[in-house]
């Protein structure tokens, strides 16, 4: 049964031509009196005679039922109509007209005069007394003005000031004639008439984009009001009237987007079904979008957020932005994020590392929530064939013997159900042993230079050569890098030690060969001369060795040696042999008894007793 004091409101003044725009209409019920109406609806109940005069009522105590009574709006009661913060996300602060800024919490009531700031990524939703819901987006500044209700009439007057940022709202239908929801900006004023709308004020406060999804909005600037119907939008710039309304972009096509997302960062790509300058994408926990968790403006038909997001159920909302900066209708796509446990972070070896031995140690960091790990190793990055798979449980390392070659490895976390989740990004490695020590080394000296040679090694581009005076190879006397498996060095007579190793093109050097001894023989003795003195032969020569050997033979090739005599110094005396013709030479003896090249042979003829005056002639060098 209808209440005795239910007011019937006319939503449009044009429905009752005789009603003044500033009068509120009350429809009487049986038993109503002007005195009772005054007590219920007037600021001053004693003002009921003014209502009587305005409506030409003969008997204020007897009002016919279903009679329209006009009541001037300025006589009606005004009561507070606070707004309530229903959902707060991120950094949101507010202050009263006199107080400092403080954190805004859900269920906080705003009575008018407050300023609310949202930080990057922050948002707050409000519920107003008339049922209007509004969301203040990130990086916005909103000032709450008048929040008042006209008693029990159902009319609510809401006045807001948007100083920067964006608003999205679903405004309740406003009750005539005094109910109203308006948003004032530095550029224009938007009067809402029961609508779904958005306002976007540029950072410099010089440009306002108004988008109407349903209902209507009156946008006023520079003395001009533009009525924007649902499906249209307008742009107002500082110092200019609002532009003519233009149609909003239709809903984007989100068909084909995954219903289940198993990796982060969160990203989506959709096929555009219209031209667009940009795309606004948002993520919320439910379709109401009272709390916007992620948001971004993207130049391509795709969205990506680096922000972490807990596993759960979410809704993606996307709309196209046209060349005027107006944002179109929304498309929503529900999805489930099931990305945990995350793949572990690979630790060692580094991507592209070279390993020099077959026992390869793979290491990774623990992943939160993982119940174990799966490791795959394959010879190709697509892991299509030859895959080696291991489940090391909760261990964070795996040792695998790998032959030489290129390899790739990756690790996935295992969830409580034993399922391997998303794979880590693969890493490459290469098992390539260092070159072995060169083999087959030989060395020979010619009295002036030492010549070295060794077998070439596979996979090397050059060789390091070292020569020292001690087998420890300390304080090398010579160091060379050669591109061929041979080299030479000019050295004084003596004993030396040498070694060599292979070097790869990237500078990696292999093992040294074992130090090998080599002796540089002494130089050939020169200027060999002799003199017969009595029964003795006196010899002298030039040379730098300490020890020499004198060879005596009957042939110039010294195939049949008669004697070999070791001497010290550069001269000696020998006993003459029997009558005959002989050849004589001198060899220097170096370190470790190594013989140098022989001197030029000397021809000696012994004929028996020799006159003293012939002795010097007999010892002349052979021609």
Image (spheres, rainbow, N blue to C red):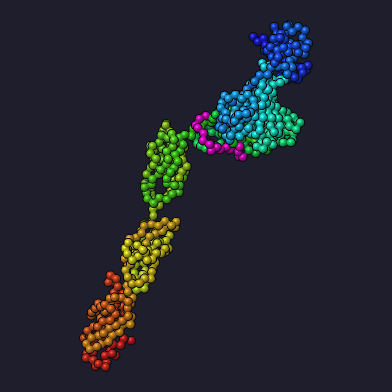
92 to the left or right of 513? right
Of 26 and 117, which appears nearest the observer? 117
Q: Which quadrant holds the C terminus?
A: bottom left
Q: In this view, does 166 lie above or below 426?
A: above
Q: Picture coordinates of residue 594 (x, y %)?
A: 29, 72
Quadrant in the rendering for residue 328: top right
Which residue is depicted at the point 40% across and 52% down? 432
Note whether residue 66 is visible: no
Query: Quick check: is 85 in the magenta stretch?
Result: no
Q: What stretch is highlighted in magenta?
A: 297-313
Note whether residue 40 is visible: yes
Quadrant in the rendering for residue 204: top right
Q: Which quadrant holds the N terminus?
A: top right
Which residue is depicted at the point 34% across and 69% down? 444
Total of numbered circles in the picture? 0
60 to the left or right of 443? right
580 to the left or right of 300? left
Q: Is residue 142 above or below residue 32?
A: below
Q: Picture coordinates of residue 303 (x, y %)?
A: 57, 37
Which residue is depicted at the point 24% across and 78% down? 565
Q: Picture coordinates of residue 261 (x, y %)?
A: 51, 34
Which residue is depicted at the point 64% across and 34% down? 165
Quadrant in the rendering for residue 539: bottom left
42 to the left or right of 417? right
Q: Picture coordinates of residue 363 (x, y %)?
A: 40, 43
């Amino acid at each position: 049964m209808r209440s005795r004091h239910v007011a019937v409101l006319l939503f449009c003044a044009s429905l009752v031509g005789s009603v003044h725009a500033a009068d509120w209409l009350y429809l009487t019920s049986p038993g109503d009196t002007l005195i009772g109406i005054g007590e219920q609806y007037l600021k001053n109940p004693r003002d009921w005679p003014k209502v009587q005069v305005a409506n030409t009522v003969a008997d204020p105590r007897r009002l016919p039922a279903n009679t329209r009574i006009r009541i001037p709006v300025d006589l009606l009661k005004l009561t507070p109509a606070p707004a309530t913060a229903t959902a707060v996300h991120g950094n949101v602060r507010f202050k009263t007209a006199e107080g400092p800024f403080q954190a805004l919490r859900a269920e906080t009531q705003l009575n008018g005069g407050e300023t609310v700031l949202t930080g990057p990524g922050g948002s707050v939703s409000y519920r107003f007394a008339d049922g209007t819901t509004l969301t203040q987006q990130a990086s916005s500044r909103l000032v709450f003005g008048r929040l008042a209700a006209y008693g029990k009439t159902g009319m609510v007057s809401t006045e807001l000031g948007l100083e920067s940022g964006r608003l999205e709202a679903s405004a309740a239908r406003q009750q005539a004639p005094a109910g109203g929801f308006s948003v004032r900006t530095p550029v224009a004023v938007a009067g809402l008439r029961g609508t779904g709308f958005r306002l976007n004020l540029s950072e410099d406060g010089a440009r306002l984009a108004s988008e109407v999804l349903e209902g209507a909005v009156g946008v006023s600037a520079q003395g001009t009001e533009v009525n924007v119907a649902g499906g249209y939008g307008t742009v107002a710039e500082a110092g200019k009237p609002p532009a003519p309304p233009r149609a909003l972009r239709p809903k984007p096509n989100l068909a084909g987007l995954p219903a289940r997302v198993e990796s982060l960062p969160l990203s989506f790509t959709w096929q555009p079904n219209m031209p667009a300058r940009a795309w606004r994408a948002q993520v919320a926990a439910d379709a109401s979008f009272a709390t916007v968790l992620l948001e971004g403006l993207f130049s391509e038909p795709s969205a990506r957020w680096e922000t972490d997001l807990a596993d759960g159920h979410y809704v993606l909302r996307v709309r196209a932005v046209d060349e005027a900066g107006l944002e179109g209708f929304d498309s929503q796509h529900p999805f489930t994020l099931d990305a945990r446990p995350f793949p572990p972070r690979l630790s060692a070896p580094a991507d592209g590392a070279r390993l020099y031995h077959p026992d390869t140690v793979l290491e990774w960091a623990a992943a939160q929530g993982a119940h174990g790990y799966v490791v795959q190793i394959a010879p190709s990055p697509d892991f299509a064939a030859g895959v080696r798979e291991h489940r090391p449980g909760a261990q964070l390392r795996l040792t695998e013997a790998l032959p030489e070659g290129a390899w790739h490895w990756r690790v996935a976390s295992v969830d409580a159900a034993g399922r391997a989740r998303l794979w880590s990004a693969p890493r490459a490695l290469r098992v390539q042993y260092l070159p072995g020590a060169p083999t087959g080394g030989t060395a020979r000296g010619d009295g002036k230079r030492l010549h070295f040679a060794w077998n070439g090694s596979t996979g090397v581009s050059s060789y390091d050569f070292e020569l020292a005076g001690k087998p420890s190879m300390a304080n090398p006397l010579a160091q060379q890098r050669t591109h061929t498996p041979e080299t030479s060095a000019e050295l004084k007579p003596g004993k030396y030690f040498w070694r060599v190793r292979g070097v790869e093109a990237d500078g990696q050097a292999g093992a040294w060969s074992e130090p090998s001894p080599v002796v540089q023989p002494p130089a050939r003795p020169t200027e060999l001369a002799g003199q017969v003195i009595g029964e003795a032969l006196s010899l002298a020569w030039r040379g730098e060795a300490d020890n020499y050997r004198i060879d005596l033979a009957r042939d110039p090739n010294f195939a049949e040696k008669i004697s070999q005599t070791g001497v010290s110094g550069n001269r000696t005396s020998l006993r003459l042999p029997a009558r005959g013709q002989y050849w004589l030479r001198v060899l220097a003896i170096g370190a470790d008894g190594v013989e140098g090249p022989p001197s030029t042979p000397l021809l000696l003829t012994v004929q028996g007793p020799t006159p003293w005056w012939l002795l010097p002639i007999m010892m002349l060098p052979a021609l």
